[in-house]
C-alpha cells in the first residue's frame, strides 16, 4: 500500500534517480521531472501528496515555481537547495514551502523531512471543539476550512496545522520548541525562523490588522499565544 505520491522536480538526473530509488524503496509512488513546465503539467493532471522542488531550476526559478504550485495545490512542498542561510530559508517558506533541505543531504534526513511534511496535527478528542468561531473568523478543524470576514481563505497544510494547534491550546504561552515539535515533529526545535515566517503568514490571512494582531500574539523570548475570547 502506497505511503503517498511524491513529485521530484530537479534538473540533475542523478539526484532524481537516487531519490526515486530511495523513495520507492520506502513505499512511495514517485514521478520525476527536470523542468517547471513538466511539473505544472503533471500537477494539473495528477494528485500528489508532496513535491520535492529544487530551488535552482533552469528557466523559471524554484521560488517562483513554489508560488505557482502553492496557488493551486495543497500538496506539501520541500525545497532543495545548496544554500543554508536564514534569508534563504525564509524566502523558501515565504514562497509557500513547508520545509527546506540543504544539499548534500542523507537519505535518512530526507525521509525524516518528508515524514514531517506529511504529518498532520490530530483532530481534537471526542467532545473537543471541531468548529472554532471567533468574531470574524470561522475555523472548521475537521474539514480544514477557514472563513475570514465572509470569505474562504486558503492556508497551506502547515499553516493550517500551526493554526490548529494554536486554537486548540488557547490563552496560554506556547514555546517555540513545543510548537515546532507539535506541528513539524520531534526532530525540530531550533527552527525559530519557520515559526516566525508561518505566524506572519497566518496573521496576514486572519487578522484584520496583522501589525496589531488580536488573536495570534507574540510572547517575547518564549513563543506565541492564541487569544480566544
Image (cartoon, rainbow, N blue to C red):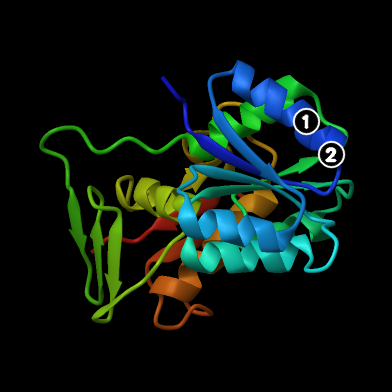
Total labels: the figure holds: 2
Q: From the viewer's side, name the closer residue of 70 and 192.
A: 70
Residue 106 is situated, as x and y percent measured from the top left of the image, at: 80, 24
At mark 2, the secondary structure is: helix
- Quadrant containing the C terminus is bottom left
Residue 192 visible at all: yes
The residue to which callout 2 is attached is 13
Q: From the viewer's side, name the closer residue of 2 and 142.
A: 2
- Within 10 angstroms of label 2, few (less than 14), some, or many (20 or more) residues? few
- Residue 50, located in which quarter of the rendered image? top right
Residue 97 is situated, as x and y percent measured from the top left of the image, at: 62, 54
- Residue 36, located in which quarter of the rendered image? bottom right
Residue 197 visible at all: no
Circles 1, 2 touching at the beta carbon (< 8 Å): yes
Identify the residue at image location x=18%, y=48%.
130
Identify the residue at image location x=58%, y=37%.
177
- Within 10 angstroms of label 1, few (less than 14), some, or many (20 or more) residues? few
Residue 157 is situated, as x and y percent measured from the top left of the image, at: 45, 51
Q: Is residue 174 above or below residue 55?
A: above
At mark 1, the secondary structure is: helix
Residue 168 is situated, as x and y percent measured from the top left of the image, at: 30, 46
The residue to which callout 1 is attached is 17
127 with respect to 119 (left or right): left
Amino acid at each position: 500500500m502506497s505511503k503517498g505520491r511524491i513529485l521530484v522536480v530537479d534538473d540533475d538526473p542523478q539526484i532524481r534517480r537516487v531519490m526515486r530509488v530511495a523513495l520507492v524503496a520506502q513505499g512511495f509512488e514517485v514521478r520525476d521531472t527536470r523542468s517547471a513546465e513538466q511539473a505544472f503539467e503533471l500537477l494539473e493532471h495528477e494528485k500528489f501528496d508532496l513535491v520535492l522542488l529544487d530551488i535552482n531550476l533552469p528557466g523559471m526559478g524554484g521560488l517562483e515555481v513554489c508560488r505557482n504550485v502553492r496557488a493551486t495545490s495543497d500538496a506539501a512542498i520541500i525545497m532543495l537547495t545548496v544554500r543554508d542561510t536564514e534569508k534563504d530559508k525564509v524566502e523558501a517558506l515565504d514562497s509557500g514551502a513547508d520545509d527546506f533541505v540543504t544539499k548534500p543531504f542523507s537519505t535518512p534526513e530526507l525521509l525524516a523531512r518528508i515524514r514531517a511534511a506529511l504529518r498532520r496535527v490530530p483532530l481534537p478528542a471526542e467532545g473537543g471543539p471541531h468548529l472554532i468561531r471567533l468574531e470574524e473568523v470561522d475555523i472548521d478543524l475537521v474539514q480544514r476550512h477557514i472563513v475570514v470576514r465572509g470569505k474562504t481563505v486558503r492556508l497551506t497544510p502547515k499553516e493550517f496545522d500551526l493554526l490548529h494547534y494554536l486554537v486548540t491550546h488557547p490563552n496560554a504561552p506556547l514555546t517555540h520548541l513545543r510548537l515546532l515539535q507539535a506541528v513539524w515533529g520531534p526532530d525540530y526545535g531550533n527552527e525559530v525562523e519557520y515559526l516566525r515566517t508561518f505566524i506572519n503568514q497566518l496573521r496576514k490571512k486572519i487578522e484584520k490588522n496583522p501589525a496589531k494582531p488580536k488573536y495570534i500574539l507574540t510572547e517575547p523570548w518564549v513563543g506565541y499565544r492564541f487569544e480566544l475570547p
